[in-house]
Every structure is written in C-alpha cells, then in structure tokens.
Amino acid sequence: MTTRNIRFKEYVEQQKQKVGEHKEKRHRTLANETLDMVITRFLEYRTDVEKVAEVTVRGNKSKISLLLGDLLPKNKALTDVTLSQFLAYLEKNDGIENTLNKVKEFYQQETELGHNTIAGLINLCNPFFNRYLELPVKVKTMGKKATYKKRAKVSEIDQLLHHIDQKYRLKIQLTDDEKKKQLFRMKWAFERIIITTEKYTWARSIEICNITKQDIIEMRKTNTLRLRSRKRDKNPEVYQTPYVPDEYIKEWDIYERYRPVNQDTEKAIIRPDGTEMNTRSIRRVFQINREDLGLGDHLTSHNVRRSMHTLARSVINNKKIAQLQLGDISSKIADTHYNIPDPELIQYEMKRLYETGNLPGETPTPLEHENMEKRGDMAYA
C-alpha cells in the first residue's frame, strides 16, 4: 500500500466524519423546531446551497407545505408539530419511505390533482427528506407531461391591447376624481407594457421582472434589450439581447410617462402601487384581460413566447433568427453550429414577421395596431 493510498483512505474517513458531524448538528438544531420553521430552513438551503432559482423556490414553498400537511396526524397543523415528532409519527405508522409511496398512490387514485401537480409534490420528497434531512429515503420521481395548447396569434395579442385601451379609457371618463384618473393611467400603462414586452421580446416572465432602467437606456441606442435568467445567461451574449422594433420603444415612451416613482429599485417595470412585481403579476394581467374578452386559456405569457417563436420559424427565412430571439439554446450548439445573422438581416426579418402576423394558410386577421395619434394620449381620455 503506497503512502498516497494511505493518505486517500484517511481523507475518506475524515470526510465521512465531517458529514456525520454535520448531519448530527443539523438534526440536533432542527429536531425541536416546528415543521413550518423547518420548511423555511429547507427553502434557504435550496437557494443558498443547491443554487435553485428564486422563482422555483417560491413555488416549492406551497408544494412542500401541502405535502407535509397531508402527512400530518389528524387535526394537526405545521405549526403544532416538531420535526422529531413528525419523523417519529411516520416511522411508527409505516416507515417514511413507505408512507411517501402511499401518498403518491393516494394522489393518483383518490384525488383530482393533475399529473404535473402530483409530480411537483412527489419530486420534492428526495430534496427534502434525502438531501436536506439526510435520511435514507428514496422515492421514485415522476416525469412531467408536456402540455399542448393552441398557438396564440398576433391578432389575439392585439385584441388584448385594444381591450386594455378601451377598458381604461372608459374608467377614466367615468370618474371626476383626479387621483383615480391617474391610478387608471398607471394601470393602463402597466398592463400594456407587460403584454407588449411579451409580444416583441418573447421574454420569460422572470426576465421581464429583471429588466432594469439601464437596460431600457441601452435599448433606445441599440434596438436590442438585455434579458436575464439562469437559462439565458448560459448562452453567448448575442442570445441575451433580442432585437426589438421601434414600435416597442414607443410603448416605453408611454409607460415611462406614467411609471410610479420609486427610487429604491432599479427595476424598469413596477406595479402601479410602486412596488416591484413578480411573475404572478404578469400571469394576472394576461388572465384578467383574456377572461374579459372570453378568449381561451392559451393566451398566457409562456404560450405567447412559444407561439411567437412558432410563427417566426414559419414566416421568416432564417430559422436562426427565431432561435436567437427565443434565447433558449445551449451555448455548445450556439458556439459550434450557429453563425450569427447580421443585425440588418435580423431587423428586416423581424419587421416582416410583425407585418405578417399569421401562419401561411391561415385566414388573415386584421391587426389591432394603433399609432399614438389614433389611440390618443390617456392624459386626455
């Protein structure tokens, strides 16, 4: 046995001892904390140690709370039971792993929860019980099913924008209160900029939330908008800055006129009440306005993004431009196989895309484009 081999074995033993001490310390720290506090610590672990995106961790909170709540003894809440009591209860009944497998069967056979909802719950079992609590528990994960929605048309997106114009123009005209008028103008500008940002940039919801004031200053100079997300940041820089047409820059002229004042944030788009928005704010804007018009649930932020990409791949001549705008491609493929189109070609093809507005063979639908003169300034509505 060589000296290096001996040193390696000693190193392995030291690491095992460190892991054991860490596990014992964590369990000792968490044992007497209530489950709601343990969940808080788990979410911090997901963010700080596993580097999971903040928007994902926010979704994890409701899921893990629901899952653990279903496993609790009858008439008990997360705030009533400590971690040690909870684990002892599971072990006493049928063992932790068996209980988790049974709750999975229960969700599938006895509830109306959808497949992807159940998958979201079950797929948190291993991160929580195995990786965080370091218990010898392994639950078979579930793959999510692809969802199929019909394509959102440019004309439908423009219907949403037209509806927003009409809705707030009427509200402004029906009130004499100047404060209410100004609030309606801010809501009008906020809802328009959310939908036009999705229409012209194909951004993910988190990317819309992350746009900064400086990004807008640069956009006015370059006709490209810097977008930030964990996926997009892995790609070459050109994939992080999709082209935007002059029409979109005009929308920013409108929004900035009514944007609430908030010196504490660098975020470019904020709610009418002056607070920073989140992805839920974006989903809500789409939901309210499509329901007002009786349009289908395919008009979501994510589906608009994908639908614009589908349209572009069918209408414009260069498929790489569509992929570049979407910003959803591995950096390896981009570096190896993709020649970046000239900015002039990108601008030409994207203008042609928005002028077309329909897939080949579709019944043409007149777009609801309205210039500033025709739409009018809401200051005078």
Image (cartoon, helix red, strand yellow):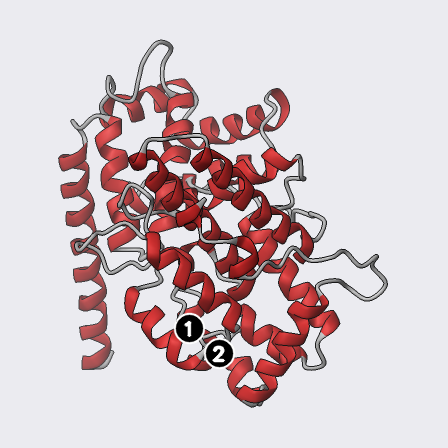
Q: Which residue is mark 2?
A: 331
Question: Does residue 247 appear to the left or right of 368 in the view shown?
Answer: left
Are the residues tagged 1 and 2 within 8 Å (C-beta)? yes
Asked whether the viewer can see residue 328, the reply is no
272 over 39 or under it: above or below:
below
Q: Amino acid at mark 1?
A: Lys
- Look at the image and tell me in which quarter the N terminus lies: bottom left
**Residue 217 spot, x, y in % from top left:** 32, 73
Q: Residue furthest top?
A: 75
> Nearest the camera: 312 or 236?
312
Identify the amino acid type marked 2. Answer: Ser
Q: Residue 314, located in which quarter of the rendered image?
A: bottom right
Dot 1 crowding, Cα within 10 Å, few <14, some 14–19, many 20+: some
The image shows residue 18 at horizontal and vertical percentages of 16, 55
Dot 2 alpha-carbon crowd within 10 angstroms: few under 14, some 14 to 19, many 20 or more = some
Q: What residue is drawn where x is 62% and y is 59%?
A: 369
Query: Taking 169 as reference, is 4 above or below it?
Result: below
The residue lying at 39 percent from left, 72 percent from top is: 226
Marks counted in the figure total 2
Q: Is residue 286 visible?
A: yes
Q: Position of residue 379 (x, y in %)?
A: 39, 49
Q: Nearer the viewer, residue 262 or 106?
A: 262
Q: Residue at x 69, y 58 (%)?
A: 367
Image quarter in which the C terminus is found: top left
Mark 1 or mark 2: whose residue is earlier in sequence: 1
Picture coordinates of residue 185, whole percent (x, y): 39, 44
Q: Which SS class for mark 1? A: helix
Q: Which residue bears the numbered disc 1? A: 234
In the foreground, 275 or 11? 275
Q: In 3D space, how far apart are the residues under numbered discs 1 and 2 (Cα atoms)?
A: 6 Å
* Above or below 58: residue 331: below
The answer to whether residue 367 is left or right of residue 218 is right
